[in-house]
Amino acid sequence: MIRRVDTGARRLAAVLLLISLFVPLGSQIAAAEAPSSSAVSPEARERLYGEIAAEVAELERKGNLLKKVVQLVKPTVVHIEAKKAATDSHGLSRRPSEEAGSGVVIERNEKFYVLTNRHVIRDSALPQIKVRLADGRTLYPKKVLTDQATDVAIMEVAASGLVGARLGDSDNLEIGDFVLAVGSPFGLSHSVTYGIISAKGRRDLKLGTGEVKYQDFLQTDAAINPGNSGGPLLNLRGEVVGINTAIASSSGGSEGIGFAIPINMFMRVATQLADRGNVVRAYLGVQLDRRFGAAKAVELGLPYPSGALVSGITAKSPAESAELQVGDVIYRLDDVQVEDDDHLVNLVSLKPVGKEIEIVVYRSGKPIVLKVRVGDRGDFERQ
C-alpha cells in the first residue's frame, strides 16, 4: 500500500556510495592492503593516521557541500501540526485527531506562503493549524488554499524575518540525480536525508482515499518516515525540486520507495490558488483507451513505443473542433513525448485554458500535426 508520509534517515548504502564517489580508487586499494592494527608499530600507526586524515579531508570537503545546502534551507522549512475534528459512526463528536507534517516557505508577490500537502491540513480549521518555524516561533496561517486533485496546499503566513526557499526546475531532473529531503519525521524537526532520483513520471498510485487524480510523481530512495509530508526535496544547489508526499510501505516506515510532487507541477497549481483562489484545468475532450501500451504502439508502427490511443471524441469539444479522430494515437504534445493516457491528461490539465497547443497524432501509418485550443474542464463537467 501507499502511505503519505515524509522522508527520513540516510542509509548505509548511500554513505558507502558517497565514499566510493569521493575517495580515490587508489586510496580504497591502499586501505584494503593496509596491515591490521595489531601488526604495525606505534610509528607506523601514527603514519597511517596521518595518511587517513589526508585522504578523508577530500571527502570532508565534498561533505561540506551538503552542510551548506542544509544551512541555506533550514530557515525555510517548517513543522506543521493540525488538529482535525472527528466523529464516530453515529455522527457524534469524539476526541480530535492530530496530523503532523512539514512545509517549506516561499515568497511570492511580497507575500509568504507555506507549501505543503493537502492531506496534512485537511479538515482542520485555521486556529487548529500550527506552523513552527526553525527559530522556534509558532505561527497560525492567515489563509489556507488547497487542491484535492493534486494534494497541493498553500498557507499564507505573516511574520518578521521570514525567509523564502529558492525553487528549481523539476523538468531538468534526471534519474540518478542526487537529492536531499528535509522535514520533521516523527515530530523531530529538521531531519535531513540523502538519496537519488530513482524514477520520474510515477502515476496511478493508490494514495489514501484515491482523491489525488493528477499524478506525475518523482520517485526517490531517500529514506521516508511519518511526519515528512509536505517537506522539500532539494537538489545539490539548495533549490526545491519537489514536495515530498508519500511512501510505498507495508509497515508505515521507510522501505526505500518515496514519492514527491515535482515542484513545477506543484507551482502551476499553487500559483492559481494564490492568484485566484481556485484551480482551472484545461481539457481536450477525448476518451482514451487505457489498454493501449507499448506492444500495440509497436504493432501500429509508431516512431515511439508510447502514446495515448483515442477511443472517443466529445461533441462540441476542442478535440472535435481540431478534427481528431477515433483511432488516432497522440504521441507528442508541444515539445513533450506523450508516455501514456495519464501522462497526456496531466500535460493538458497544466496548460492555460484557451491556449493553442500543437499535438502530433499517428493516423493511417503517418504522423499528422494538429493545432488545438484547449477548453475549460469546468465548463465540460458542468454540461
Image (tube, grey):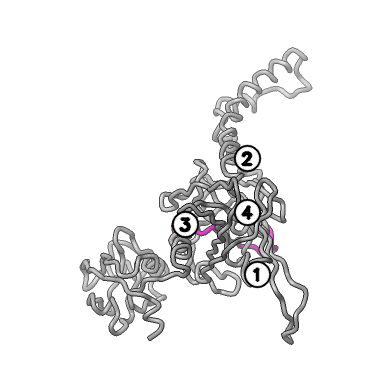
Residue 358, image x, y percentages:
26, 65
N-term mark: 1 or 4? 4
Identity, as a three-letter code, of the amino acid under mark 4: Thr
Q: Secondary structure at mark 4?
A: strand
Crowdedness of circle 2 by 10 Å Cα count: few (<14), some, many (20+)?
few
Of marks 3 and 1, the one in the foreground: 1
Of marks 1 and 2, the one in the foreground: 1
N-term mark: 3 or 2? 2
Q: Badge 3 is on which residue?
A: 200
Residue 289, image x, y percentages:
38, 77
Taking depth in this image into account, of 305 and 86 the one nearest to the observer is 86
> From which residue to which does the magenta span run?
248-264
In space, the residues marked 1 and 4 are separated at their CA atoms by 23 Å
Point out the image quarter for the N terminus. Answer: bottom right
Identity, as a three-letter code, of the amino acid under mark 1: Ser
Q: Is residue 100 above or below residue 211?
A: above
In space, the residues marked 1 and 2 are separated at their CA atoms by 39 Å
N-term mark: 1 or 2? 2
In space, the residues marked 3 and 4 are separated at their CA atoms by 17 Å
Identity, as a three-letter code, of the amino acid under mark 3: Lys
Of marks 2 and 4, the one in the foreground: 4
Going 39% across and 65% down the picture, which residue do you hit?
Answer: 350
Q: Secondary structure at mark 1?
A: loop
Q: Badge 2 is on which residue?
A: 15
